[in-house]
Amino acid sequence: MKANGGKHTAAEWKALLATSLACAECNRPWEEIPKRPDPRYKNVWTKGHKIPVYHGGTDDISNIQAECYECNFRKNAGALKR
Ligand SMILES: [Zn+2]
């Protein structure tokens, strides 16, 4: 992964997650998102970047959002296709 600078702490991410009741991308509440196929991953939310890293987004908390794994994976799949 390319480093674009910026960083955030685990506490900042936790605080953000605590105020995020739904996916920032598709706006579905967490309870409406199907469980992940891999039972090792219990949470349907993932840490995502508002501006994707491959578009120059940073790892700063201002560029971080909680999004469901489906949106996160779809965005990453799009990045790979380029
Ligand atoms: Zn989503």
Image: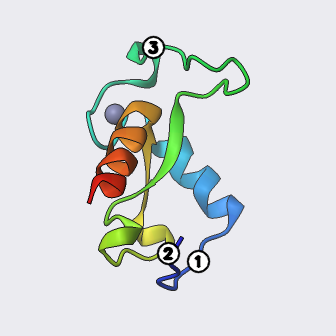
The answer to which of 79 and 71 lies nearer the viewer is 79
* Residue at image coords 31%, 25%: 28
State the separation of the CA atoms marked 3 and 1: 30 Å
User: Is residue 36 toward the left or the right of residue 32 in the image?
Assistant: right
Q: Nearer the N terminus, badge 2 or badge 3?
A: 3
Left or right: residue 55 compared with residue 44: left
On screen, residue 58 above or below 73? below
Q: Are marks 2 and 1 in contact (CB under 8 Å)?
A: yes
The mark found on residue 55 in the picture is: none
Q: Which residue is mark 3?
A: 34
- Vertical side of 72 occupied by 56: above or below: below
Question: Residue 22 location, x and y as percent?
Answer: 38, 32
* 45 to the left or right of 41: left
Q: Position of residue 4 (x, y in %)?
A: 47, 83
Q: Label 2 amino acid?
A: Asp
Please give the residue where the numbered disc 1 appears in the rendered image.
Answer: 7
Q: Which residue position holds label 2?
A: 60
Q: Do residues under tags 3 and 1 come within 8 Å of each other at their CB atoms? A: no
Quadrant (top left, top right, bottom left, bottom right) of the C terminus: bottom left
Name the amino acid, label 1: Lys
